[in-house]
Amino acid sequence: MTFMKANRARAPLCAGLSLTLALALLGGAGAATTTEHASATLSPEAGTRVHGRALLTLDTRTHVLRVVVTAAGMVRGSSHPEHIHAGTCKKPGRILFGLNELHAGKNGAGRSVTAIKGVKGIAARGWIVNIHRGPALKGAGATPVACGPVVVAGSKAARTGERTQASPWVRTDRAARTVDLKVIAGYNNAGAGFNYDGYDKGAMTVTVPLGYKIVTHFENSANSELPHSFVLVPGKGSFSLVKPSPVFKNASSPDPTVGTAPGGSATVTFVASKAGTYRFVCLVPGHFEGGMWDYLVVKPGISQAFVTIH
Ligand SMILES: [Cu+2]
C-alpha cells in the first residue's frame, strides 16, 4: 500500500468544534439562516505535496459568495491560479468561478480570499476547487496540483461523511471492513513538532466506520527530535498519563510512555467496536500536555473513513 506524502500544515482552528458537534449545530439551523456554508478538503494531485482547505460562505440576501482557500506544501514563493470548476477532480469540467491567485510564502503556505457576486446558491454536488500549478494557465501550468469536491454543510454527503475523493492518508477496504490509516508523528514543525500528520491540539479528526478494523501505520518522522507514541483514549475527561489504558484492545503503540524513536514505526491494529469520539495522544511525558493529540470518531452508518481538518 502506498500513501501520497502530503504536506499537512495547519489550517486555522475553528474554535475547537468537533465534527460531530459542528454537524449537529448546522443540522439545527432553521429557515431564518441567511448564509450557506460549504467546504472542500484539497488533496494533492499530480504527485505534489500541496494540501489545503476551501471554505465557502454564501450570503443569500446579497448573493455574495466568499471563498477562503488555505494551502500548504507549495513551492516557496510560487503563484497559483485557482478556480471553482464543474465536474469531479478526476474529470474537471468548465470553470464556474475564478478565485484570486494563491501565493505561497517562504514556508510554502498561502491563503487567498475571493468575493464573488451574483451567486444564487452552492450546488449540492458537482463543484470542485482546483489549485493549478501556474504561474500561468498554459500547458503544464494548467495542471491541478490540489483538488477537492465542495461539500455543503448539513447536506447528505456531509452528514454521512461520504466523500467523492478519499483523503490521501486513509484508505477504506469496504469488503474487508478495514481502514488503513497513516499517522506520522512530528510530521512538521506545527506545535513545535508535537503533532500528528501536521496537526496538533485536536485540529484533525479521523472518522472511521463502526466495527471496522483499523490498521494504523504509525511512524515517528526521521526529522523528529524526540520519541513519540500513539494511544487511543477517551474523547474528553481525564485519563492516566502514566498507565496506558487504550479504549480499544491493542490501540496503542509499544511502550507508549517511552515512545518510538525518530525514524521508527509500529503497526497498531484495533477494532473500532464502539461508536463515539476518542482522542489519539502521545504518552511520552509532557507531549499530550504540549498539544500532541487529535480526534478519532467511530461512526455508525458510514462505510468510508475520512479526515476533517478544523
Ligand atoms: Cu510525543
Image (spheres, rainbow, N blue to C red):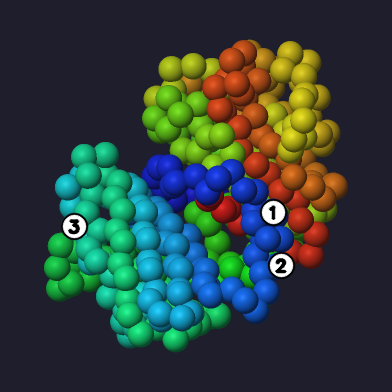
Rate crowding at label 1 as few (under 14), some (14 to 19) or many (20 or more) other CA atoms within 10 Å.
Answer: few
SS at mark 1 in the image: helix
**Residue 64 visible within the image:** yes
Picture layout, residue 60 above or below residue 160: below
> Circle 1 sits on which residue?
21
Residue at image position (30%, 67%) is: 114
Q: Amino acid at mark 3?
A: Ser
> Circle 3 sits on which residue?
79
Rate crowding at label 3 as few (under 14), some (14 to 19) or many (20 or more) other CA atoms within 10 Å.
Answer: many
Q: Is mark 2 within 8 Å of ligand 1?
A: no
Lower position in the chain sequence, tag 2 or tag 1? 1
Rounded to the nearest angstrom, the CA distance separating label 2 from label 3 is 40 Å
Residue at image position (74%, 45%) is: 277
SS at mark 3 in the image: strand
- As drawn, the label of residue 28 is 2
SS at mark 2 in the image: loop
Residue at image position (53%, 75%) is: 34
Residue at image position (66%, 34%) is: 280
**Residue 2 visible within the image:** no
Relative side of 37 to 95, left or right: right
Q: Is mark 1 within 8 Å of ligand 1?
A: no
Q: Amino acid at mark 2?
A: Gly
Q: Amino acid at mark 1?
A: Leu
